[in-house]
Amino acid sequence: MDLLSNLALGFQTAISPQNLLYCFLGTLIGTLIGVLPGIGPVQTIAILLPATFALPPVTGLIMLAGIYYGAQYGGSTTSILVNVPGEASSVVTCLDGYQMALQGRAGAALTISALGSFVAGSFATLLLAVLAVPLSEIALKFGPAEYFSLMVFGLIGSIVFASGSVIKAVGMIVLGLLLGVVGTDITSGTQRFCFGIPELADGIGFVSLAMGLFGIAEIIKSLEQREKRDILKSKISGFWMTKKEIKAAAPAVVRGTLTGSLLGIMPGGGAILASFISYMLEKKISRNPESFGKGNIRGVASPESANNAAAQTAFVPLLTLGIPPNVVLAMMAGAMMIHGIQPGPRVISSNPTLFWGLIVSMWLGNLMLVILNLPLIGIWVRLLSVPYRVLYPAILLFCCIGLYSVNNNTFDIGLTALLGFLGYLFAKLECEPAPLILGFVLGPMMEENLRRAMLLSRGDPSVFFTRPLSLAFLLMALAMLVVVTVPAIRRRREDAFQEEGEER
Amino acid sequence: MYIRNTKDFYAGLVFLFFGIAAMVLAASYQIGTAAKMGPGYFSFTLGSVLTVIGLVISLRSLSRGEGLRKALSYRVKPVILVLSSVILFGLLLRPLGLLLSTFILVFVSSMASYEFKKKEAILNAFVLLAIVLIIFIYFLKFQIPIWPSFLAGRL
């Protein structure tokens, strides 16, 4: 069977000492930053991107991927123990997880979230392996028109699941596309929006943009509030679940895994959305929904499995179509491009060791996380006592050193400060930065495909509507836009996000 | 006319600014035709779309009567201190080297916190210096000037 020989190839790559080491490092760092509120996978990947330059691409990507799914594990630990979600995707875990901790069942909650995550991660990794080849074969048949429409669909999808105003999100996408245009035009060699600055000829650095919008802007925003610290009151004892708990949690893990896997693949989906939806679903199908929020183990099992499954399946659209479904995956796309790999359907055929090695490493990483997480919980919890006023200068310092090392120039540091200010401004004006990053990553590809499509059709834009697949993507994009702007649904969507805000 | 939603109003203005700037700049590049797009075609189109979006957002935030006002609240200190600590690091890294500029970055940025304590910030700077030297210089072998350039020849 093809799949088996591919996975064997992946194992060969992933099991090399260097790759194992970086997979371990990635998951360890991921768990660490997952535990720490105030720093998430996006900032961490931005900081560590430059450190991967010296590594082979596959090793670098294995580490960065480990940070992403490792953060899902770490985030749940603090949700359960101190009611502080380390990550946005473990916000719902607080609801029942912390209640369980208060009832003395913290150990069981931690165990089910680790085991649930492992089951979900394994399933999602397998799904990724199975889906990747057929999907990428379809994608290889796409012409430029289909690609352009697919990107429109992907970008619109990122709005639907973002909170806040739809038109502002569209504005952020367009601005992101524009920022992506900065630099030398590959077709004509014209320098666009460079203002005569030689450092801009290669475009705005992805690392600068990501660190500015997510690193520096976040720090300035957090400093507007005084620090709040919760101290761990509950003691952890007994990691074993009771029979009753296992019976309740097992089906919830399965449901969470399926919901999460599905939502991870959708454009705009990902770990955060998956955890919310699976929690709501679990509550809806329960015979006694009022037990949720009072320490129901299903309320921990399902979202924790879902967010991990989604973190893995989110790689499907990136690796097969070249479309990152959310910001973290946009960061991964940026990382791939920096390493000279164009994300898309050709990755599997041109870089099979990278592709299959990455997939197998995800499974190994999940295994490491289960083993790593439970015994180390004591250390993670102690880390929570690191105050933010000590943490953020460290983040700034690592950002700056990383930035300098990208091109060995100090211009990038200044540019990042400027982008950081812009990011803060957007945060104050309630414009989400995530759509901007997605636009930035897709901008150059979109222009290229638009150009080619129009060249082939001799300037006739109807090509986007006469080719069936292209039309289908555009119609789906339109449908999504209509759905979010229809008042009734819009209100419900705002309610959903309102709930999310309160729970935070 | 009243500004009903300050955040939307300014967000619209920001988009408007970028949209118009993009259109003006893109107009100076070759636009080309739909079939043979020049370097300015895509950017000019994006600029005009952004301009329209900015206008719509700003205009929608205005109302004739007095309505709910969404005001902006912000704190200037972290904006200035955090940004200047980063810019200073960029400016000083080459002439002063990593040791001194790390110290300046950590100290200046720490002042932005409500809970700023002088001694703690200094201690933090020393700890971070050690971490940076071990991880980035020793293990990752980043090529960064460590000592001030005026001392470099003599050490």
Image (tube, coloured by chain):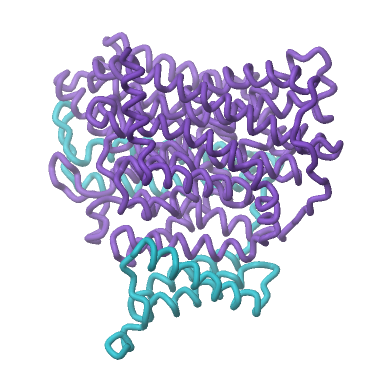
Say whether residue B12 is visible. Answer: no
Residue drawn at (39%, 17%) of the image = A131
Q: Position of residue A191 (x, y in %)?
A: 19, 50
Quadrant including the N terminus of chain A: top left
Taking the spot 33% from the left edge, 14% from the top edge, the residue there is A134
From what the image shows, is residue A394 above or below residue A29?
below
Compared to residue B27, the image places residue A224 above or below, namely below
Is residue A280 shown left or right of residue A393?
right
Residue toward you, B24 or A78:
A78
Question: In the rendered view, does A238 fall on the left or right side of B107?
Answer: right
Q: Residue at x 68, y 42 (%)?
A: A77
Which of the chains is cyan?
Answer: B
Quarter where residue B45 is shown: top left
- Farthest residue to the bottom: give it: B154
Query: Which residue corresponds to the image point at 42% horizontal and 42% vertical from the top-left?
Result: A20
Classify A355 as above or below A35: above
Q: How many marks?
A: 0
Residue B151, position in %: x, y? 33, 88
Quarter of the image holding residue B49?
A: top left
Where A333 sits versus A246, above or below? Answer: below
Q: Quadrant of the C terminus of chain A?
A: top right
The x and y percentages for residue A90 are 65, 37
Chain in purple on the image? A
Q: Is residue B44 visible?
A: yes
